[in-house]
Image (spheres, rainbow, N blue to C red):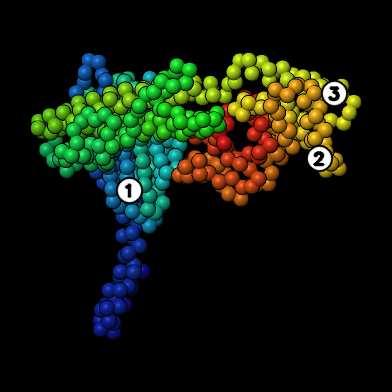
């Protein structure tokens, strides 16, 4: 068929149309070329990564490892690692493709016990975790992953290890011929080293710039100092209370608690940042050793030593803050307590009213629902649920006279019109709130004492990170059940 085609179009009749001939030939040939190209696997490339046998005993030196990879139907725009030895791959593509990577089995990729590992690696494609086993194969020398992607993508490969422990890191035992394939004994071209992406904390940057000296104590990064005072019942408090009533003292105490909790959280974050930095610098130091950059090795070692001292200082400050928090919490418990004699008197009055009105023996119509002791305001709270058909004002007046006769005039009491509300019953919380939940507001940056509640709900605080919105009548029931709430 092609022979007749060429004979026809190369005859004198068609020789004047060479352009048409060329176009037709391109149309015929292109499909074969495309098919041939797509049928070929792309060539393997490789990058070099430092493998460190952390905490090994006896100590094993770090090594350069060759990690092969290839990509089909895409372009790699970034390939880097971080201080946790994760591998990040950014891919640019407008179609479906595949990224293949081979991790040497002898690379120190974990510090878990062999029997406790379900996955050797964690893999995310565009922040979605995939079933590693579905894309994994292996040979004598490598764990091989063939990872599909669609259009622009990011792939993250994480080593499954416990970065907080001091357990030794290790790889698999392999045949000697695998070592020659995977280990680079003399790196000639540093450009093949995978770049490390790490942002140093401001503390470290300022130290390197000569702006500060380390270690620092109570500097601008902690922004907190403590002044001890002996005040309440001989207890040592890390502040001087100024309130004159129990309510004022409780509010003040809670604010002091929040300040120290905030400082403790800040120091905890600093410790985590510095530990990550030390781990990163240790990796950089190992890389510099292998490259024989002696000056850099010394600089990294010096910085690591200084940062470890700073971590020690922060740990001491953190311990002291937690000790202070313990003192404040003890003081808080004391604030909620009444004088032992008063406690006995109010408990006796509570028992009398409970027996008289809540035992079921009272023949007279009774709308009392709860009898509790408000230890903060040192008063007995009688909760009532008066139906609309009853004259509430008259009922409360008559009930007050009865209670005075029962418990005497020394006991302070208050009658509150309460709706019966059980904490576990969602119906008592009213209609869905118009604003975000208290915790969501706090989580997104609203200070705990600025959280908004929809009327008739009021803001109360159970702890440094626990704002809640409850109805006024629910407050007494919760306090009576042992909840410590701050208004």
Q: Where is mark 1, residue-wise?
A: 90
**Residue that numbered label 2 is attached to:** 392
Q: Does 449 sit above or below residue 217?
A: below
Quadrant of residue 208 within the rendered picture: top left
Q: Residue at x 72, y 35 (%)?
A: 416
Q: Indicate the quadrant where residue 37 lies.
A: bottom left
Q: For the view shown, which residue lies furthest in the front direction?
A: 409
- Residue 125 location, x and y as percent? 41, 44
CA–CA distance in space, label 3 to label 1:
74 Å
Q: Secondary structure at mark 3?
A: loop
Image height of 451 relative to 278, above or below: below
Q: Position of residue 463 (x, y in %)?
A: 52, 31
Q: Quadrant of the N terminus?
A: bottom left
* Residue wearing tag 3: 360
Q: Is residue 168 above or below residue 26?
A: above
Q: Quadrant of residue 411?
A: top right
The tag earlier along the polypeptide, 3 or 2, is 3
Q: Nearer the viewer, mark 2 or mark 1?
A: 2
Residue 291 visible to the viewer = no
- Looking at the image, which is closer to me, 253 or 231? 231
Whole-number angstrom distance, CA of label 2 to CA of label 1:
72 Å
Instruction: Say the numbered circle drawn on residue 192.
Output: none
- For disc 1, the neighbor class at 10 Å (few under 14, some 14 to 19, many from 20) is some
Q: What x and y, as percent, mark residue 45?
A: 24, 43
Q: Secondary structure at mark 2?
A: helix
Nearer-the-camera pick, 115 or 197: 197
Using the numbered discs, state the Cα–Cα distance from disc 3 to disc 2 in whole angstroms.
21 Å
């Amino acid at each position: 068929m092609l022979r007749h085609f060429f004979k026809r179009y190369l005859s004198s009749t068609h020789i004047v149309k060479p352009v048409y001939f060329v176009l037709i030939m391109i149309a015929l040939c292109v499909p074969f070329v495309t098919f041939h190209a797509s049928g070929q696997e792309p060539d393997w490339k490789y990058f070099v990564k430092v493998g460190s046998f952390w905490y090994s005993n006896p100590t094993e030196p770090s090594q350069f490892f060759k990690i092969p990879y290839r990509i089909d139907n895409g372009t790699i725009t970034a390939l880097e690692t971080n201080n946790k030895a994760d591998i990040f791959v950014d891919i640019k593509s407008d179609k479906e493709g595949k990224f293949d990577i081979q991790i040497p089995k002898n690379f120190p990729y974990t510090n878990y016990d062999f029997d406790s590992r379900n996955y050797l690696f964690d893999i995310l494609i565009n922040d979605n975790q995939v079933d590693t086993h579905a894309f994994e194969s292996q040979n004598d020398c490598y764990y091989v992953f063939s990872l599909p992607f669609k259009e622009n993508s990011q792939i993250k490969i994480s080593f499954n290890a416990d970065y907080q422990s001091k357990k030794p890191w290790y790889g698999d035992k392999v045949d000697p011929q695998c070592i020659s394939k995977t280990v680079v004994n003399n790196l000639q071209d540093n450009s093949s080293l995978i770049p490390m992406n790490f942002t140093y904390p401001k503390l470290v940057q300022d130290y390197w710039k000569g702006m500060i000296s380390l270690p620092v104590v109570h500097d601008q990064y902690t922004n907190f100092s403590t002044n001890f005072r002996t005040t309440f019942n001989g207890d040592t408090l890390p502040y001087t209370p100024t309130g004159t009533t129990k309510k004022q003292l409780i509010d003040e105490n809670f604010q002091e608690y929040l300040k120290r909790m905030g400082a403790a959280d800040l120091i905890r974050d600093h410790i985590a940042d510095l530990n990550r930095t030390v781990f990163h610098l240790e990796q950089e130091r190992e890389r510099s050793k292998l490259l024989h950059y002696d000056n850099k090795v010394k600089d990294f070692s010096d910085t690591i030593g200084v940062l470890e001292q700073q971590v020690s200082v922060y740990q001491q400050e953190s311990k002291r803050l937690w000790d202070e928090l313990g003192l404040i919490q003890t003081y808080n418990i004391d604030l909620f307590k009444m004088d032992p004699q008063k406690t006995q008197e109010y408990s006796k009055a509570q028992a009398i009213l409970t027996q008289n009105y809540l035992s079921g023996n009272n023949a007279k119509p009774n709308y009392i629902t709860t009898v509790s002791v408000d230890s903060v305001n040192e008063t007995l709270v009688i909760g009532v649920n008066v139906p609309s058909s009853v004259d509430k004002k008259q009922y409360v007046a008559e009930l007050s006279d009865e209670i005075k006769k029962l418990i005497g005039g020394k006991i302070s009491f208050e009658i509150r019109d309460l709706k019966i509300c059980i904490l576990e019953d969602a119906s008592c919380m009213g209609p869905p709130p118009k604003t975000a939940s208290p915790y969501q507001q706090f989580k997104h940056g609203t200070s705990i004492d600025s959280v908004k509640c929809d009327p008739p709900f009021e803001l109360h605080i159970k702890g440094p990170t626990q704002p809640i919105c409850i109805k006024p009548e629910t407050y007494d029931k919760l306090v009576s059940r042992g909840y410590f709430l701050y208004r």
